[in-house]
Amino acid sequence: MMGWSLSVGLVSGGVLLALGLFLTGPYWSLVLWALCQQAVLAFSYNFLGGMGREFHLGHCAFFGLGAYVSAVCLDAALPWWIAMVGAGSCGALTARGLAAFLVGFRGPDFALSSLCVAILAGILARNLGSVTGGVSGLSTVVLDRGVPYLSTLALLLGTVWIHHTLMASRWGRALRAVGSDPLAASQLGIPGDSIRAEALVLGSALASLAGGIYPMHSGYVSPESAFGLDVLLAPVVAVLLGGPGTRWGPLWGSSLLVLVQEFLLTKFQESNLLLFGLFLVVSGLRAHTEVARHWAGLWAYLRAAKRSPCLRP
Amino acid sequence: MTLLHPQIALQGLATGAIYAVAAMGMQFILGSTGRVHLGVGQALVMTALFLGWTLERTGIPLGWVMLGLSVSGALAARIMHPPALWRHVLREQGDRAFLLITIGAGMAMEALAQWLWPLPGMASVAAGAPLSLSAVFIAWPKGLAIVVSASAALSLYALLHRTRRGKALRAWDMGSAQLETVGVDTHRLARWATSVGLGVAAMGGVLLGMTQVVSAQEWIAWSLKSLCVALIGGGLNPLSALAMGWAMGVGEAWVSQYLGPQWHPALAPVLLPLVLRLRSRGAI
């Protein structure tokens, strides 16, 4: 039942998004594309950052890595799909290598160590000029907008399907158990470190794939656009807004984040940073009322209302 | 060829002094409440920019300006961190909310700082003869930074070990529930620790403004650097923060000399995970 409703939801959502991407004007299609990219990053963050309850501040380092690998491949005149495969596999392999070191940390130590990985990645991108183009970055060929739009859409739908399927699986329950109480989980025989390592590799591979699409659309990648603070924090903030570890929280959170940022950028150009900062403060103060919980509450009310006549409006 | 030229080592020590003072501020909040306050860098940068403006427009002596700005930083922190905030963020999972709040507040203040000081700046302090130690010379603001960092560490150490509030802060490490059982109001204590921590960070801002060119966008880099030094120092110990800050400054000078100046920012993010891996309570 869950599989059917999910498939129908994904297909109809995909058709609506495709129509939005191709039939709206250039501005709204760009906003929708940014929203899809952000949603992929938020869903991929939700594995370890939401279900695993780790504060994975370095998640978007893999987005940057994917962007650079893809830009180098495109620069070498390789086809776009090889660039994407290269970005995804490079991200997964790097995450596999780092997992051995990172999963030994818990809580704040994990957050800071993963942040250090992201900062180091940015420093390497700035200083290894012969490969990365240094501070000025790499310019690539801009592909026809159909390629980045459709591949982002396919990636989003695939990510949501993987996210939802794994969340309801034995693996997802084990990851949540490890996140909630690592000691109790280990006493039940759940191999916490290996499950966290798998979540790290899976989330990183998806983030790298999203990064692989980025230079195809923008035609440019630089240390600031790949490893900048706003890039690193965006999925963390989106998942915090939507609700960590929830099914649709990453989607609501990233939609809210992208739309608020766009609104402030277009309507309040002078004071958008000030207003966005205040928005984050208010979100932090209201952190216990995430968007996903509102939606879950509304959904539960509607289901109850359907069953009980006295609750019908 | 010497391992590190004494002149470069002394310059590194002066930069390390600023890291140390900022790390002491960070440690005061982190070591007691267990919450990472990313606004520490903003206190540093805003004070550094405000110092230039104050010295340019008023004729107040530097010592009074340093004292005034530190006290102002502590008072501003007290106003901006009401007990209700601590009731909210000292709950379970409140660390994430606090991080979001401090990032947001930092961004909002960056916008304000960009509006007030759109260009990078450095305070023009009165010129004086450089201090000399045999054949090694150092500009007096940098020498002052080293002395102030050592004095701040000793004062904070005394505060933590000789006063009732300081002892309560150190006891917090054992758990807030136990502290509340013996009648300590942890929310008020957290507010006090934040005021002192950000006041100390503001003092670091005065040293920063005297010795380096600074811009409004640098706050997050300073927050992260002070966090790294505070964590490598470990615990609630100003003397370890001082030692690690100085060591970090000298280490960066060494990296700059041998690998090039573009690699010195890599030292802290390389050292921090290694130290956490080997000793989760810090290097000292």
Image (spheres, rainbow, N blue to C red):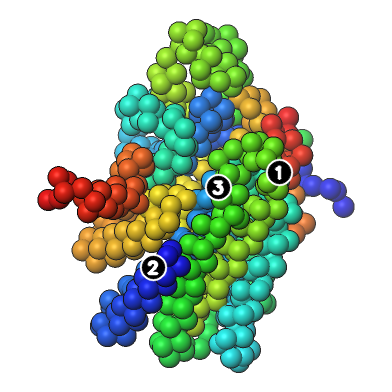
Disc 1 to disc 3, C-alpha distance = 14 Å
Q: Position of residue A31 (x, y in %)?
A: 32, 72
Q: Is residue B108 left or right of residue B162?
A: left
Q: Which residue appears at 38% of the width and 77% of the height?
A: A11
Q: Position of residue A59 (x, y in %)?
A: 56, 58
Count of numbered badges drawn on the protein: 3
Disc 3 to disc 2, C-alpha distance = 23 Å
Q: Which residue appears at 51% of the width and 57% of the height?
A: A168
Q: Chain of mark 2?
A: A
Q: CB atoms at circles 1 and 2 under 8 Å apart?
A: no
Residue closest to the eye, A37 or B228: A37
Q: Which mark is residue A189?
A: 1
- Which element is circle 1 on? loop
Q: Chain of mark 1?
A: A
Residue closest to the eye, A247 or B186: A247
The amino acid on which the numbered mark 2 sits, given as a three-letter code, is Ser
Q: CB atoms at circles 3 and 2 under 8 Å apart?
A: no
Residues indicated by labels 1 and 2 sit on the same polypeptide chain: yes
As drawn, which residue projects farthest toward the left?
A313
Residue to which mark 2 is pinned:
A5
As drawn, which residue projects farthest toward the right?
B1
